[in-house]
Image: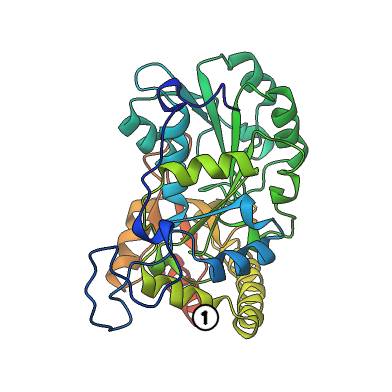
Amino acid sequence: MNNLVRKDLQTFNAYSSARDEAKQGIIFLNANESPYKNKINRYPEKQPDALVKIISTLFNVKQNQLALSRGSDEGIDLLIRLFCDAGQDSIMLCTPTYGMYSIYAKLQGAKIVDVPLLKEKNYQLDVDSILSTWNKNIKIIFLCSPNNPTGNLLNREDILFLCKSLSEKCMIVVDEAYIEFANAESLASDINQFNNLVVLRTASKAYGMAGTRLGFLLANEYLIQWILKIIAPYPLAAPVIEIAVDNFSKNNLIKIKKQIACIQSERDRLRNSLQKIPFIKKIWPSDANFLLVKMDDSESIMKKCSNQGIILRSMFDKKGLENCIRISIGTPEENSQLINLLEEKNT
């Protein structure tokens, strides 16, 4: 992996913060903080021990195989900055997919190579094309599973085959933002087998903490050490840490598990109801907390919904997804309002 890290970072020394150098003490006079206590007058830990312990147990990884970040978006940014030399290296992505991979690549000056998903195979990976297109300047392949915006899981065997085929040549980053809504095991269980496998998770979706901007990067210990070298000295705010520790409590996780089951059930109900409406032409299978829907005159539908306060997400600008709308799964009451409104449109 060291060969994949940017050459100019090979001897990089991370900033050593005051909190890194001394966590324990009685009188802290080392960080230029206010001495007047108000719960947030002190800098937080870079990687708070209590939260790291909770998340590592939840995701079944070792504590040194985990990095906490400001949303999984920061994980994407850090990986591209770590491996891609501006103007020289590239990332590979498989469209249609999450838009931030290309945004962060452009910000870093990295090139973008696109090997589209196979639409005729329900947006699965074109493994042969990925391998034949790959070259030594492609440092990272970003895969989203379940994929956003199509909602489908990518074949696990395909991903692991890519990890094996490109071992020591390229990082395979699997974004599992929606994995809790799929009846599938996280690829985090394979990070011990493949040193080039990175898994991104988030608190924003199933765990209901989008406002905290909390993400998780799971990988081998060596890569985590590199990520912690280049991440901000204090990536998580103290209130975020406190909220997260509380929300990941055992009792709250039981509640979240029930909410996930409800969303899965509502996903099926919404799909079944929408299929009966004539102007809806296609609904793709989903392993996430949303549906990708193709319909006649989708712009008019979105406007009608917006006028009633129901906001949907346009996919019109994505190649091959013309007249498509992404619909997040709401509460049963919210979903019923949407169904009723669309049924009215049909009458």
**Is residue 199 rendered to the left or right of residue 100?**
right
Residue in the image at 65% along x and 53% along y = 285
Which quadrant of the view contains residue 53? Answer: bottom right
For residue 310, above or below residue 91: below
How is colour applied across the structure in the image? rainbow
- From the viewer's side, name the closer residue of 196 and 292: 196
Q: Position of residue 152 (x, y in %)?
A: 63, 48
Residue 228: % across, % down: 48, 47
Secondary element under disc 1, as helix, strand or loop, is helix
Q: Is residue 11 above or below residue 317?
A: above
Badge 1 is on which residue? 246
Instruction: State the image coordinates of residue 100 (x, y, percent, origin top left).
Output: 40, 42
Image quadrant containing the C terminus: bottom left
69 left or right of 268?
Answer: left
Q: Which is nearer the eye, 214 or 286?
A: 214
Q: Is residue 54 left or right of residue 86?
A: right
* Numbered label tally: 1
Quadrant of residue 135 within the rendered picture = top right
- Residue 15, compared with residue 255, is above or below; it is above
Using the rendered image of the protein, determine whether residue 67 is visible from the camera's viewpoint.
Answer: yes
129 or 235: nearer the eye? 235
Residue 322 visible (yes or no): no
For the N terminus, the image quarter is: top right
The residue lying at 50 percent from left, 16 percent from top is 137
Crowding at label 1, few (<14), some or many (≥20) Cα neighbours within 10 Å?
some
Check disc 1 and give the amino acid type.
Asp
Give how far across and how far down residue 20 sits, in percent: 42, 57
Instruction: In the rendered view, tell whether residue 37 sits above or below residue 345.
Output: below
